[in-house]
Every structure is written in structure tokens, then in C-alpha cells.
Image (cartoon, rainbow, N blue to C red):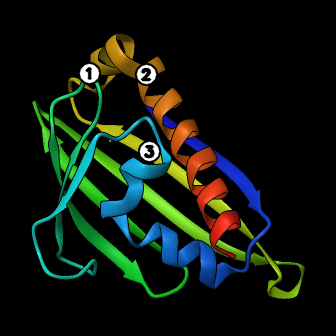
Amino acid sequence: MEFWTEADVDAPPAALWAVLTNPTDWPRWTDSITSVELLDPTLTTGARVRVSQPGLRPMVWTVTEFTEGTGFAWTAVAGGVTTIGDHRVAPLDGGRRSRLVLGLRQRGLLAPLLNLMIGGRVRRYVELEAAGLQAAAEKSA
């Protein structure tokens, strides 16, 4: 399974980035996440983050890529499925606005079965996260 969504945000990239890279606040602005716990002191390459979502088992994500101000990717492995989450920020209108890109990819032998079982929920959660992130960044700008 692979799913991507984009949102144009009426906030500069720095404001969007600040909200995106503060995952412990994510449950405040999206119903798709119930709790986030940083297992390492800062969100950077190698950091681990425990994320709990309604109706899903908590997962520990490891940041595999981190580029200050523009994006990060993290990976979680469970039940033979590797899930990769991408979070990207790009400037629009000379930096007055931003584009948010969120993506989720699942790989592994059981990924097609998992997609059949919870693919709709996963897509809905990514959409909820994009909408919540957009609103939170616009409010903070």
C-alpha cells in the first residue's frame, strides 16, 4: 500500500515545520492519534517515537531521515510489515505559504492483507493528520 496527500498551508514553512516536528502535541490537533511519546531526547535521525492511534496497536517509529526545515521519514516494523511515514514541507509564494506532503508506504509479505484489513482507516488517518497539521500551523502563524 502507498498513500500520499498534500495540503497548501497559509503559514510560512518555518511555522509548519515547528508544528510538524513537535509530535508530542499531535494528539491536540488530530483525532487520529491518542498519544505520542519521544523515547529519545530530540526528533532527529535515529530517534524513536511511540505513537498510539485509535483501534491500532501502539507502534515505535525510528526516524530514518531528517533534513532540518524540509522533512523527515520514519519507519516502524510490526508483524512482518514495514511501514514508512514521510513528512515534507516546501515553500510556496516566496515562503509566505507552504505545501505539506504526507505519505505512508507499507512493504512486506503481509502488507496486501493489512491493506485489505485496515487500509481505509490508514488513509483516513493520514488525511486527518494533514488537515489537523494544516489548521495547527495556520493558527500558530
Q: Position of residue 99 (x, y in %)?
A: 72, 65
Judge whether 36 appears above or below 4 on screen.
below
Q: Residue at x 80, y 85 (%)?
A: 95
To which residue does mark 3 refer?
104
Q: Position of residue 124 (x, y in %)?
A: 52, 28
Q: Earlier in the sequence, mark 2 or mark 3?
A: 3
Give, as a three-letter code, the residue at label 3.
Leu
Q: Position of residue 127 (x, y in %)?
A: 58, 37
Give, as a three-letter code, the residue at label 1.
Gly
The answer to whether marks 1 and 2 mark residues whose Cβ atoms lie closer than 8 Å is yes
Q: Earlier in the sequence, mark 1 or mark 3?
A: 1
Mark 2, other Cα within 10 Å: few <14 / some 14–19 / many ≥20: some
Q: Is residue 22 left or right of residue 108?
A: right
Give, as a three-letter code, the residue at label 2.
Arg
Q: Residue at x 55, y 80 (%)?
A: 70
Judge whether 3 appears above or below 62 on screen.
above
The secondary structure type at the circle numbered 2 is: helix
The foreground one among 26 and 59 is 26
To which residue does mark 2 refer?
121
Q: Earlier in the sequence, mark 1 or mark 2?
A: 1
Judge whether 75 appears above or below 54 on screen.
below
Query: Which quarter of the image is occupied by the N terminus?
Result: top left
Query: Which quarter of the image is occupied by the C terminus?
Result: bottom right
Q: Is residue 88 left or right of residue 40?
A: right
Query: How far is mark 1 from mark 2, CA to CA?
Result: 9 Å
Q: Position of residue 113 (x, y in %)?
A: 28, 15
